[in-house]
Amino acid sequence: AFPAMDRCKEIGPGWRLPNILELDSIRDMTVDSDPYSRLPDVASAIYWSCSEYSATLAYRLIFYDGSALSGDKSFNRRLRCVRGW
């Protein structure tokens, strides 16, 4: 089970959790550049991606420096759902 993926699906048809590359594409690539994204409501925080490391771990993106780290899928982190392919 991956609660973050379930939360995106609850929004409605077509909503999903982005993969790590998609998530990184909405990050402002300038390190330490507040607000870290040109999209609204993106904080200097850690966001889930749907990219899996293993059955129990998935990758998270740290928006303030662009690091991608794996974490237990049950951890409570922010998410940014997307729609489309």
Image (cartoon, grey):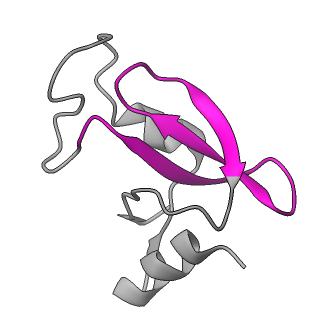
Q: In this image, 73 relative to 42: left or right?
A: right
Q: Is residue 12 visible?
A: no
Please name whichever residue, 83 or 63, is drawn nearer the observer in this view of the structure.
63
Reply above or below: 32 against 63.
above
Is residue 48 magenta-colored? yes
Q: In this image, 63 relative to 66: left or right?
A: left
Q: In this image, 48 relative to 1: left or right?
A: left
Residue shown at 43%/66% (left/top)?
A: 84
- Which residue reaches farthest top? 31
- Which residue reaches farthest front? 75
Could you tell me residue 35's position as x and y percent? 15, 29
Residue shown at 58%/50% (left/top)?
A: 19
Q: In this image, 5 relative to 69: left or right?
A: left
Reply above or below: 5 against 64.
below
Q: Is residue 6 visible?
A: yes
- Which residue reaches farthest right? 55
Reply above or below: 64 against 48.
above
Could you tell me residue 26's position as x and y percent? 34, 37
Residue 21 is drawn in which quadrant? top right
Q: Which residues are magenta?
A: 43-71
Is residue 68 magenta-colored? yes
Could you tell me residue 52's position as x and y percent? 75, 53
Reply above or below: 66 against 5.
above
Residue shown at 59%/61% (left/top)?
A: 75
Could you tell me residue 69's position as x and y percent? 64, 34
> The N terminus is located in which quarter?
bottom right
